[in-house]
Image (tube, rainbow, N blue to C red):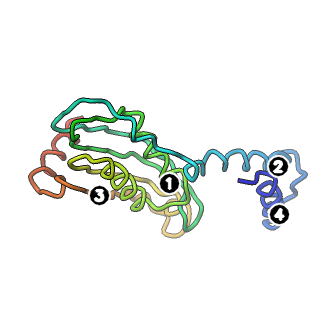
Amino acid sequence: MDKERVKKLVRELIIEIGEDPTREGLKDTPRRIADAYTEIFSGYDSDSELSVQFSEDSEMVVAKNIQFYSMCEHHMLPFYGTIQIAYIPNGRVFGISKLVRVVEKFSKRLQIQERITKNVADEIYAQGVKGVAVMAEGEHLCMKMRGVRNDAQMTSSAFRGVFEDQKTKEELLKAIQNK
């Protein structure tokens, strides 16, 4: 990301909305936004490192309440929530930090919740696990602070491999509900 260009564009936006970019509270805003966007959109340059695995087997591994923060690609406003990931290993397990990094890789982009859910499931499934399920719950500021102005939450899910079987889905839901 070209931070200098972002700073210039933000300065122009400040002027366009009717503000003075030289005003005390706005002087450093273009730099702050350029710095923030470097972090917020770091998913484009991210490597999830899922190839690092440990020899171990388990019937089901569940990582609950992985926080995510993203930016809606339609309004460029934040949405955030939690993701639950369950997978059935095929002789090797991932460190939990690797699962968090996969979530960050896809959430730190202009995005929609449904795509994050699908991308995370696809990335993990591509590593040769027997199955993966990803469920995300999100709150969307694009809906809360504009438009319909409603506090509704959204849930999305993606199931791959053995999790496409109804009995396995039910076992997963029991495991996740036992907080």
Q: Which quadrant, please, contains the C terminus? A: top left
- The residue singled out by tag 4 in the image is 12
87 relative to 6, above or below: above
Residue 145 % position (x, y):
55, 60
Q: Residue furthest left?
A: 167
Tag in front: 3 or 1? 3
Mark 3 vs 1, N-terminal side: 1
Q: Quadrant of residue 58?
A: top left
Tag in front: 2 or 1? 1
133 relative to 101, above or below: below
Estimate the spatial distance between the alpha carbons at disc 3 and disc 4, rounded to whole Å.
Answer: 41 Å
Q: Amino acid at mark 4?
A: Glu
Which mark, by number, is residue 158? 3
Residue at x 52%, y 57% (from the top left corner): 141
Estimate the spatial distance between the alpha carbons at disc 3 and disc 2, rounded to whole Å.
Answer: 42 Å
Mark 4 vs 2, N-terminal side: 4
Mark 3 vs 4, N-terminal side: 4
Helix, strand or loop for disc 2: helix
Estimate the spatial distance between the alpha carbons at disc 3 and disc 1, rounded to whole Å.
Answer: 19 Å
Helix, strand or loop for disc 4: helix
Estimate the spatial distance between the alpha carbons at disc 4 and disc 2, rounded to whole Å.
Answer: 12 Å
